[in-house]
């Protein structure tokens, strides 16, 4: 019964989280965001004390229930392990000693990265962030392809319930990282069950420490056990030593497989007898227990923080080559767009804030209705790899849209009201006159002005009957509408330059216009 409850709860949670990432039609209620907010690392970064205390109490009461039924990556591993058993009916697990040195080393590295605001490493190891990238870059394209296939089938019968959507790669590097994560963790789960959880995952190591002291635990009923070893063979955490009737509770994920498989009813989930609790999590020598503790480990990390930071100073790599193009006459050559500062999403406040809070789960990337939020590569520097930035090649940031801040579980992108969003300056417009077709081809245009919601770009007389864009950076919100519709090729004549720190601007009500994009942009 316990296992059936766990499996049912796990299936519901992972299905809802996955669909929350995949939902492009807005069918699911936004209240499902709470499933992302109760994940351990997002709760830690957002300083959500209520969730953190609840998760710790849950662990101290019932063991690693979070790893078993709440963490989507843990549930993915269980699903993969289940498939492996279907493929090989004789598949069995074996007890293995805990790899505590590796576990605590990875956790220590994660703590150092967190202190140093190198959230690229934190996000890479965080199970929720990793699953979010898999859902965004692997599952969602397949989901959209399935939608398009259904659209073709239903339309052929005169049913227009589905509509086609474009499918393209948001970030090759992030997709590769997501695919590698999917395959590596999947392989480990296929071969050894919860290997990733009990050797690499920093959340598993942290909760495993508290799980040793949980009130309820799976325990042997000595008078009934005949040491047949069935429980050990079915333990996907490889934490049951049936020969010695010992369980490593730091690795037990309370899956209840052992209880279900035991034919003698010799495994029970009961209140703990703390007099028999063993110290099994911390590294041990052959003769005595090591004096290292989680507290001293973290202290050593804090003591080496300055030394670590001085050795890992990161600089932003945002240089691009300038293409020199020779033309005849007095017309200046066209100039390549060189954005010096990437554009952080509205509500990110600044790159420093984004870097400290973001775990690159890419929920904002998946949810953005304009699909202008994409993972960065090196635009923010090494510490900002895979963190979100705005890119206006396929759209612009809708003037009244606040979705990214509404869904962010860590507070990296703060929620904004529509009024606050309308007055948030993410970047400033830049006009390159020599690229403009009004200047270069002496052809009438004005697309940028027509699609600027604040009239930060407006037209002024140029020559003869022509008008040319003029910009007012003081009222530009950096939405990218002008950049997106600019027809100049090969280089845009107008673009948005990002800001290190977002500003708040004042805009008169009559200056605001609604952006309407037609097929040609002008």
Image (cartoon, rainbow, N blue to C red):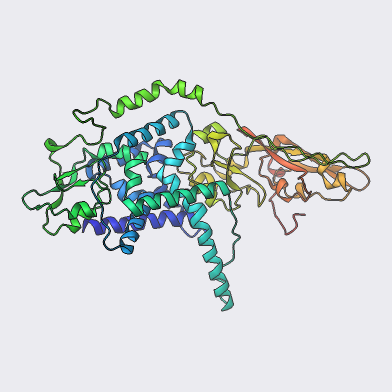
Question: Looking at this rendering, what residue extends furthest in the bottom direction?
Answer: 157
Q: Position of residue 483 (x, y in %)?
A: 72, 46
Locate residue 355 relative to residue 465 in the image: left or right: left
Locate residue 93 relative to residue 163 in the image: left or right: left
Residue 164 lies, with reference to residue 363, above or below; the image says: below
Quarter of the figure with residue 522: bottom right
Total labels: the figure holds: 0
Q: Is residue 107 in sight in this rendering?
A: yes
Quarter of the figure with residue 433: top right
Locate residue 320 relative to residue 188 in the image: left or right: right
Quarter of the figure with residue 52: top left
Question: Looking at this rendering, what residue extends furthest in the left direction?
Answer: 223
Q: Position of residue 23 (x, y in %)?
A: 49, 58
Which one is nearer the viewer's eye here, 299 or 412? 299
Residue 169 lies, with reference to residue 497, above or below; the image says: below
Q: Is residue 72 in sight in this rendering?
A: no
Question: Looking at the image, which residue is at 22% across and 38% down?
Answer: 212
Q: Position of residue 267 (x, y in %)?
A: 14, 52
Q: Position of residue 227 (x, y in %)?
A: 12, 51
Question: Looking at the image, which residue is at 47% across and 53% down?
Answer: 135
Which one is nearer the viewer's eye here, 318 or 66? 318
Question: Looking at this rendering, what residue extends furthest in the front direction?
Answer: 286
Q: Which image quadrant: the N terminus?
A: bottom left
Which one is nearer the viewer's eye here, 475 or 21? 21
Question: Looking at the image, which residue is at 50% across and 61% down?
Answer: 143
């Amino acid at each position: 019964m316990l296992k059936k409850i766990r499996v049912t709860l796990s299936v519901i949670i992972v299905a809802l989280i996955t669909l929350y990432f995949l939902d492009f039609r807005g069918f699911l209620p936004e209240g499902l965001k709470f499933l992302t907010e109760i994940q351990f690392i997002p709760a830690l970064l957002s300083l959500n004390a209520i969730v953190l205390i609840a998760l710790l109490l849950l662990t101290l009461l019932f063991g690693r229930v979070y790893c078993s039924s709440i963490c989507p990556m843990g549930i993915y591993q269980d699903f993969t392990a289940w498939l492996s058993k279907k493929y090989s009916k004789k598949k069995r697990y074996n007890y293995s000693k805990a790899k505590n040195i590796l576990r605590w080393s990875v956790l220590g590295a994660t703590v150092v990265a967190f202190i140093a605001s190198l959230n690229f490493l934190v996000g890479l190891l965080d199970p929720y962030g990793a699953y979010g990238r898999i859902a965004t870059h692997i599952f969602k394209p397949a989901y959209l392809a399935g939608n398009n296939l259904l659209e073709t089938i239903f339309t052929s019968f005169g049913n227009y319930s589905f509509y086609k959507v474009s499918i393209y790669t948001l970030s090759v590097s992030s997709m590769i990282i997501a695919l590698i994560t999917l395959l590596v963790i999947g392989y480990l789960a296929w071969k050894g069950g919860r290997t990733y959880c009990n050797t690499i995952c920093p959340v598993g190591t942290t909760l495993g420490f508290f799980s040793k002291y949980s009130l309820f635990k799976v325990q042997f009923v000595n008078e009934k056990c005949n040491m047949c070893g069935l429980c050990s063979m079915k333990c996907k955490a490889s934490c049951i030593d049936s020969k010695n009737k010992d369980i490593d509770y730091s690795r037990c994920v309370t899956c209840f497989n052992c209880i279900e498989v035991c034919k003698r009813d010799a495994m029970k989930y009961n209140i703990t007898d703390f007099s028999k609790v063993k110290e099994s999590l911390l590294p041990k020598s052959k003769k005595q227990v090591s004096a290292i503790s989680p507290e001293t480990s973290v202290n050593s990390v804090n003591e080496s923080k300055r030394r670590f930071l001085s050795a890992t100073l990161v600089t932003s790599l945002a240089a691009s080559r300038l293409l020199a193009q020779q033309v005849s006459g007095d017309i200046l050559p066209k100039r390549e767009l060189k954005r010096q500062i990437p554009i952080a999403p509205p509500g990110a406040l600044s790159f420093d804030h984004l870097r400290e809070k973001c775990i690159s789960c890419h929920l904002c990337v998946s949810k953005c209705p304009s699909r202008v939020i994409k993972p960065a590569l090196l635009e923010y520097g090494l510490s900002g790899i895979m963190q979100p930035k705005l890119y206006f090649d396929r759209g612009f940031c809708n003037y009244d849209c606040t979705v990214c801040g509404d869904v962010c579980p860590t507070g990296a992108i703060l929620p904004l009201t529509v009024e606050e969003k309308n007055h948030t300056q993410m970047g400033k417009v830049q006009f390159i006159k020599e690229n403009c077709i009004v200047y270069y081809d002496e052809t009438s245009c004005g697309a940028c002005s027509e699609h600027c919601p604040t009239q930060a770009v407006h037209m002024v007389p140029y020559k003869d009957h022509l008008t040319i864009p003029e910009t007012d950076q003081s009222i530009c919100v950096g939405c990218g509408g002008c950049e997106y519709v600019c027809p100049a090729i090969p280089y845009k004549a107008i673009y948005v330059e990002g800001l290190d720190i977002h500003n708040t601007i004042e805009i008169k009500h009559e200056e605001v216009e609604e952006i309407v994009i037609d097929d040609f942009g002008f």
